[in-house]
Amino acid sequence: MPQIRSVCVYCGSAGAVDPRYRAAADELGRSVAAAGIKLVFGGGRIGLMGIAADAALAAGGHVTGVIPASLRDAELAHSGLSELVVVATMHDRKRVMAERADAFAVLPGGIGTLDETFEILTWRQLGLHDKPIFLVDIGGDGRARTSGARTKKPLGFAVNGRSRIATHCRFCGISNGADAIHERCG
């Protein structure tokens, strides 16, 4: 598996969000930045989108937002990003986000997050990409399972090429069971 240099995060842009999900978005953003991985997301400054982006930026990470011109104002585009890419349509947004990512992570969200998730899952099933897809496991304590050395838990669930859900090790993509963490990854 190629090294993951960037991860696209799909998540909600609504302001009223469960505190557990807010904590998970913050931890995911910080963890991605701490690992030297670029974060790519939908470009909004509110909701889980904004929380993940702000956390990655605060940790010194590179954050790219991709937003359609028609939603730039409606979604309150994040003005403090490393890069903000303004595209023409939602289809362009999904395409650009996918092109710029080596992997995908899904946090809670609404219909838009589901749309993005199902589309990237479909593209994987059709063989249009073979990038890892992580459905982030947010435990009862609100922590995204991103720190294998600390929690001994996987990042979440990933979809393999046969469209089945399998647990994967944190970012390495090896599927060896529910608590698979490899020393080189932790």
Image (cartoon, helix red, strand yellow):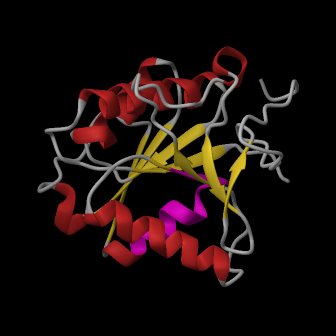
Say if 181 sits above or below 9 in the image. above
The residue located at (67%, 54%) in the rendering is 102
Residue 178 image offset from top left, x and y in percent:
71, 41
The residue located at (37%, 65%) in the rendering is 114
Residue 121 placement: quadrant: bottom right
Q: Which one is in front, 162 or 65?
A: 162
Counting every numbered tag in the picture gives 0
Residue 171 image offset from top left, x and y in percent:
72, 41
Q: Quadrant of the C terminus?
A: top right
Residue 37 image offset from top left, x and y in percent:
63, 35
Q: Does 97 lie within the magenta span?
A: yes
Q: Does 95 lie within the magenta span?
A: yes
Say if 7 sits above or below 17 in the image. below
The residue located at (42%, 19%) in the rendering is 58
- Would residue 153 appear left or right of 135 to someone viewing this image? right
Say if 146 sits above or below 115 in the image. above
Residue 124 image offset from top left, x and y in percent:
65, 74
Look at the image and tell me whether residue 93 can be seen. Answer: no
Residue 46 placement: quadrant: top left
- Name the outermost residue toward the bottom: 126
Residue 156 placement: quadrant: top right
- Name the outermost residue toward the top: 150
Look at the image and tell me whether residue 18 can be seen. Answer: yes
- Would residue 1 appear left or right of 43 to someone viewing this image? right
The residue located at (35%, 60%) in the rendering is 113
- Would residue 17 appear left or right of 35 to someone viewing this image? left
- The segment highlighted magenta reads 92-105
Q: Which one is in front, 86 or 149?
A: 149
